[in-house]
Amino acid sequence: MTAESRTSQLRTLIEKLYDRVPLYRSRMKALGVTPGDMKSPEDLSLFPFTVKQDLRDAYPYGLLACDRTELARLHASSGTTGKPTVVGYTRKDLDAWAGAVRDCMKTAGIRSDDIVQVAFGYGLFTGGLGIHDGAEALGATVIPASGGFSERQLLLMKDLGTTVIACTPSYALHLADLIEERGLKLNLRLGIFGAEPWSEELRRKIERRLGITAVDIYGLSEVMGPGVAIECPRHEGLHLQDDLFHAEIIDPETGTPLPEGEEGELVLTTLGKEGMPLLRYRTRDITRILPGRCSCGREGTRIARIRGRSDDMLIIRGVNVYPSQIETALGRVEGLSLHYLLEVSDRQGLKELTVCCEAAERLDGDGTALLAERSRQELLALLGVRVGFRLVGPGSLSRSEGKAVRIRNVA
Ligand code: DLL
């Protein structure tokens, strides 16, 4: 992609938003910029950001760039508080999305002769239908299993000969437990996992236990759904769908664009969307743009795996801690299962963290004390700050069927 063609794509988008979306016009006016100021990709930083609150304020249709009657589908993401955020897609948007997921699947190594079991939830969440449409567009055989009902998942996998499973990594770990417990022999060869942060250690566990290649797929409903970026089997970062998105990395505190290679917040601008195009959407996801080229030979932008959401970052005695780092530390301790929960309490304005993790097997008193001590040491070594640790027995933490809830606030 040349700088000229990228500039022209961005200018077309900005013109459309200026003409059709009052919020963007008033923001541009307030900043004293017009679409004509978009003369090179760097000029994008002159233009306003969009944040999640803008979608809430515009609920439900305020950010549409087309007439409501042109929408073919609506998705929504459940807000933790109050109203969900709604995203509208025209027919063309849905086709582009299916094409993006199809291309992601090809990059992951999925073929038209694969049997793809979609164990992401179907409904307002974009995971189920998004992966489904892409797998169909690829010409694969699709099993729309949706999330949960694990016994049925196993039955479908076994009887129908599923070769590819798509779900959250935390659910994949749960399925791996069940498959091992029952000694099932399956045809699985590949998994595409995403919708939540996960570590290399969890990837290795899933790959080893299920005997598959596990790839990371990224996306968010605000800009589309799954299919924004995906790994190839080389596991050297996620290939971004450059024809549909323009990526920037900014300093989450100041909003200033960061140079290539530096870690910060991912900001996405949609290209070519009709229903609800977004300009400089602040994802809150922490990653970096990787320099150089993947050994698979593909050109284009690559991002590192998402470290976590800036909202989920904990500050423990001055040290920034992401749940994914904790997962990395736990994954290095032989004998832990990677089913874990972070209990956060507030002591006079200071956050205290206790990591609860299941042992992989039942242990006696000495075994428990030893494993807990090893876990504490690994956490201290990786995080650089001492945190509480509690070892719990196998199966004692609740399992997630979709996005795992990792943080619990306790009094
Ligand atoms: O989770 C879309 C999706 C479905 C992606 C299925 C991948 C697979 P939302 O519910 O809007 O959409 O949540 C988006 O989830 O901003 C990230 O914080 C997180 N997320 C998604 N994929 C990944 C990933 C879907 N691969 C939010 N790694 C995003 C880390 C992820 N975090």
Image (cartoon, rainbow, N blue to C red):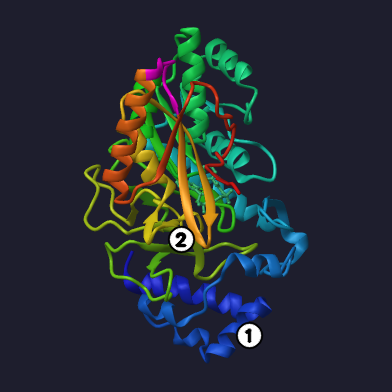
Q: Quadrant of residue 18?
A: bottom right
In the rendered image, residue 390, in percent from the top left (x then y), is placed at 45, 34
Amino acid found under the numbered disc labelled 2: Phe
The residue wearing badge 1 is 26
- Find out if the beta carbon at label 1 lies less than 8 Å from the nearest ligand 1 atom: no
In percent of width and height, residue 306 lies at 40, 50
- Closer to the chain start, of discs 2 and 1, is 1
- Decide if residue 310 is on the left or right side of residue 366: right
Tell me what residue is drawn at x 31 percent, y 30 percent.
333
Residue closer to the observer: 15 or 171: 171
Left or right for 329, reference 187:
left
Q: Nearer the viewer, residue 151 or 366?
A: 366
Q: Secondary structure at mark 1?
A: helix
Per the rendering, the mark at residue 245 is 2
Q: What residue type is disc 1 on?
A: Ser
Asked if the magenta segment contains residue 62, the reply would be: no
Counting from the top left corner in percent of width and height, residue 380 is at 30, 44
* Res. 211 visible in picture: no
Marks 2, 1: nearer the viewer: 1
Residue segment shown in magenta: 358-365
